[in-house]
């Protein structure tokens, strides 16, 4: 099953719009993992196993692995574990790649072959031919940066081009010209709920990956109200730090499960308003 | 010595504006390397040793390593080898990273600690705070995408904002607001020489990394004419495929050296016109 269908099944069957971000930072790990040479994998595996029932997707952020020698091997094992133990939950590789076509083919091999991710995040700045090698994989999701969650989103993404902000032009271009295989999605930050509303109007039913609730300050109610589709889905609302570091004790995985359940429930309450 | 000074020394002392791109594609390797499990490293090391005397910089493209399990270890050893054997030639990690601040810190660790690159390429779409963790390392170079060499550069980079194309706004913003430590540079494709001329006028003496001669069709004469600074430097003119795959025989490194020397000489002839 392709990424988009896997995601839709998960939204409806598990009744969750929560995406669990896997951003493992050893400086924040529980003390008992400090000396473990395999701590990146073990920490994330325990989090994944504890939170899978509440998740519509997992989103490992590759930078947290690539910062360490051998980190990519931990990431590959983690994704393989998720596929084996939680086959209904798609895995989004958060990598924000983007390069000329010949190089993009290498990044396709990284994301879809080596790591076997169901979807990957991509940066649209280099245009259509930089995305084409990813778009050609119809069963994999291509999730493009549109309006991001950070303050710097205002620097270029909000510049007005042809009478509309750049991020709207990006959303419109991807929805109308890049989505021939129906495998596109967009990143829209929870910290910009008005922009989220506009993007939802522009892109119809296209899934939106929404980081920025929790540590970054985005409001769950506003995200659900402005971002959901007519059937009350359409969103992957990501939380990383709020789940991963809910406890720094040996109970970190149980605490993560409680935090994931609470956020899933909060999202679902907002969906019913 | 910081990246920019290392580069300037190289321009003047070795009299070369040639950047040698290290994009190792095993499908194009000489037959005698086919079965070698360490072929990524060995191929690139031989190329680097043969071409260093003609290079103002080396630019490994990380995707060609990350496409393979264990590829990052080959990349780390390659960069360590270049630093040891050719300490005057700076290494640019071509990775086009860009993410929110907390994640950018992890990418800083990847580029400047794990791989110990002198400079890294970055994507500006996410704005100032996504760049700040890199910019804070004053001795490392931050080379931002501005107007890229591929056809898709037209899709978003040329959109008109406030009366000027986006890529010019990006160039102006980086030159005026992000370059407080003097460690910025821009990527400008050789395939767009008019845009290169405009960018040079906007950014003064800022170094420009120029891919797109050779396989992509950019003209060396136009690049030098439109991109050089008053002292005839200011450019890192990159060639990857034209050097790496000059021969597919056992003489590949010697052939690469001949191709590198020829392109360096062609660039220098153009500088004297």
Image (spheres, coloured by chain):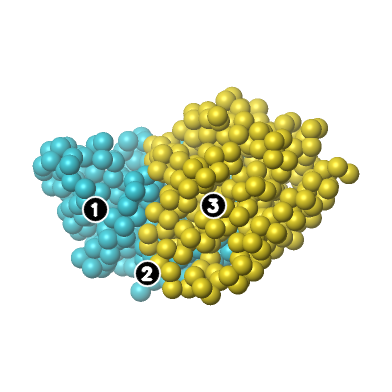
Chain colours: A cyan, B yellow
Mark 3 → mark 1, Cα distance in angstroms: 28 Å
Q: CA distance from mark 2 to mark 1?
A: 28 Å
Residue wearing tag 1:
A41
Give the image location of residue B195, x and y in percent.
76, 46
Looking at the rendered image, the disc whose residue lies closer to the viewer, 2 or 3, is 3
Position of residue B172 measured from the top left corner of the image (x, y, whole percent):
68, 33
In which chain is the residue bearing label 3? B
Mark 2 lies on residue: A5
Lateral position of residue B252 relative to residue B199, left or right: left
**Do labels 3 and 1 touch, CB within 8 Å?**
no
Question: What kind of element bears circle 1?
Answer: helix
B22 relative to A120 in the view: left or right: right
Seen at 60% across and 34% down, the residue is B6
Q: Quadrant of the C terminus of chain B?
A: top right
SS assignment at label 3: strand
Choose the circle earlier in sequence order: 2 or 1. Answer: 2
Q: Please name which of the two marks, 2 or 1, marks the residue nearer to the observer.
A: 1
| Residue B41 vertical placement versus B231 (above, below) | below
The numbered dot on residue B60 is 3
Q: Nearer the viewer, residue B232 or A91?
A: B232
Mark 2 to mark 3: distance in Å?
37 Å
Q: Residue furthest top?
A: B180
Share a chain, discs 2 and 3? no
Are discs 2 and 1 located on one and the same chain? yes
* Other-residue count near label 1 (Cα within 10 Å), few / some / many at <14 / 14–19 / ≥20: many
Q: Which one is nearer the viewer's eye here, B85 or B2?
A: B85
Chain letter of mark 1 equals A
Q: Residue A6 sits in which quadrant?
A: bottom left
- The location of residue B256, given as percent across then percent down, is 65, 60
**Residue ranking furthest to the left:** A250
- Position of the N terminus of chain B, as image quadrant, is top right
Q: Is residue A259 visible?
A: yes
């Amino acid at each position: 099953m392709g990424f988009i269908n896997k995601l839709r099944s998960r939204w409806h069957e598990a009744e969750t719009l929560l995406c669990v971000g896997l951003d493992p930072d050893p400086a924040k790990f529980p003390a008992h993992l400090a000396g473990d040479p395999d701590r990146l994998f073990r920490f994330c595996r325990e989090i994944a196993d504890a939170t899978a029932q509440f998740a519509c997707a997992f989103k490992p952020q590759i930078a947290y692995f690539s910062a360490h020698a051998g980190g990519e091997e931990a990431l590959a094992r983690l994704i393989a574990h998720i596929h084996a133990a939680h086959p209904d939950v798609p895995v989004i590789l958060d990598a924000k790649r983007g390069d000329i076509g010949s190089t993009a083919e290498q990044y396709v091999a990284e994301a879809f072959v080596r790591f076997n991710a169901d979807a990957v995040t991509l940066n649209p700045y280099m245009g259509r031919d930089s995305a084409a090698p990813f778009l050609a994989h119809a069963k994999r999701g291509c999730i493009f940066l549109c309006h991001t969650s950070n303050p710097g989103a205002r620097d270029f993404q909000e510049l007005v081009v042809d009478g509309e902000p750049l991020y709207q032009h990006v959303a419109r271009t991807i929805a109308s010209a890049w989505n021939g295989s129906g495998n596109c999605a967009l990143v829209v930050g929870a910290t910009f709920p008005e922009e989220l509303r506009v993007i939802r109007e522009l892109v119809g039913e296209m899934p939106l990956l929404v980081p920025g609730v929790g540590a970054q300050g985005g409001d769950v109610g506003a995200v659900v109200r402005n971002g959901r589709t007519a059937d009350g889905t359409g969103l992957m609302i990501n939380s990383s730090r709020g789940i991963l570091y809910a406890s720094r004790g040996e109970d970190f995985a149980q605490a993560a499960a409680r935090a994931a359940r609470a956020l899933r429930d909060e999202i679902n309450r907002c969906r019913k308003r």
